[in-house]
Image: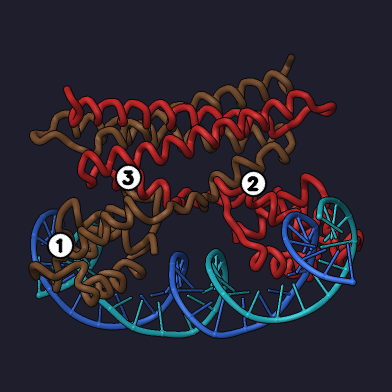
Chain colours: A brown, B red, C blue, D cyan
Amino acid sequence: MSLRYAVLGLLARRPSTGYELTQTFDRSLRTSWHARHSQIYPELAKLEAADLAEVVGRGARRSKTYAITAAGRAELRRWLVEAQPDRSQRSESGLRLFLTPLLDPADRQAAYERDLAHVEQELAALERVLAGMRGAAEPEVFAPQVELGIRVDTVMRDWLREQIQASSAGTGRD
Amino acid sequence: MSLRYAVLGLLARRPSTGYELTQTFDRSLRTSWHARHSQIYPELAKLEAADLAEVVGRGARRSKTYAITAAGRAELRRWLVEAQPDRSQRSESGLRLFLTPLLDPADRQAAYERDLAHVEQELAALERVLAGMRGAAEPEVFAPQVELGIRVDTVMRDWLREQIQASSAGTGRD
DNA sequence: ACCTTACATGTCACAACTGACAGGTCAAGC
DNA sequence: GCTTGACCTGTCAGTTGTGACATGTAAGGT
């Protein structure tokens, strides 16, 4: 049921088209809940049928703008405060990181370097997002969430650098 | 295909029964790849059919102990070093955390406090795991992974404490 | 002897998710 | 006028994952 609330949550921020939601899933939500357009469009239809969202406008190229309804907001709030969280996760990168010690030193080194490159990129992107928020007119309520992402990625980056260094000290000219 | 490699990875550490794997998924892998026994048993059968794993022993209560084969190790290595990582994730708690700013201050406070309690518990559990590893006879290659978990959870804990404090300063007696 | 709990493996109907297919619209550059 | 690329919405067959059902075994307490 998470997809339903992910969509509802994005609609609670602002009315959007399915296309816009797809992009937001790709850009902001990829690290917490991933979804494709082939899931998003049917979900919007279901949300509309359940009166949790409604079409509030039609634009160019047959686009439909959906907004959350009062019932939708109530349902979202109910889920956020009442439903017991499912703490289980699915992260292929996390799995890889967990299994990396099984590799021999050279492969391991390469794997960690690949991850480091990715995390540095991610970190730079988040810094840009935060900078954009600071420059905005209205205060951005999601700024702390971005800050958390930056802190987590920083810990990751430092840890990866340590692993790479420790590994090269053990296999290199030393 | 991640489940296949998760199972293969656990078997690479040591031969195990399906039951033991199920427990490991619950205890160690729950934060990177979650799976139930109803997926694990069929996957073991598929792995055996593909000669990536084999039954090396039968114990009490009809239990079967599986071990990874040479082909299985090769396939696991190939996946870890050659396959391009899928960085997308699915984490209900992450989604909740992302959407929490949508709640009014009182609900938000409660949500953060619930998460803080959980993360503190998690942190204590990881500390115990690390302490156990330090006391072990053979050096534990997965210790850095546990250390990373501790660092990430520490960042989470501190961030949650800040949010709770900032929130109570804004709504409380202040 | 009986009961409870942990051990242990499996199946299946159903729901969630993916990747590919399919079709159409508008703006900008050449 | 034409082509390219971004915009925009949908469907569907096949795979992955869930929750419940089903079945039985061994150990420990009373």
Q: Is residue A17 visible?
A: yes
Task: Pick whichever of labels 2 and 3 is earlier in the sequence.
Answer: 2
Q: Is residue A31 visible?
A: no
Above or below residue A129? Residue A10 is below
| Chain on which label 3 sits | B
Which residue is at the front of the view, A70 or A93? Answer: A70
- Mark 3 element type: helix
Name the residue at 36% across, 62% down: A3
- Identify residue for label 2: B27
Residue D26 image offset from top left, x and y in percent: 90, 61
Residue A53 in which image quadrant: bottom left
Task: State left or right for residue C1 relative to residue A72.
Answer: right
How many residues crowd around disc 3 within 10 Å: few (fewer than 14), some, or many (20 or more)?
A: many
For badge 1, the amino acid type reads Ala
For badge 2, the amino acid type reads Arg
> Which numbered marker is on residue A104?
none
- Identify residue for label 3: B98
Name the residue at 29% across, 47% down: B99
Mark 2–mark 3 distance (CA, rounded to whole Å): 25 Å
Residue B27 image offset from top left, x and y in percent: 64, 46
For badge 3, the amino acid type reads Phe
- Identify residue for label 1: A70
- Mark 2 element type: helix
Above or below residue A26? Residue A123 is above
**Quarter of the image where the C terminus of chain A is located:** top right
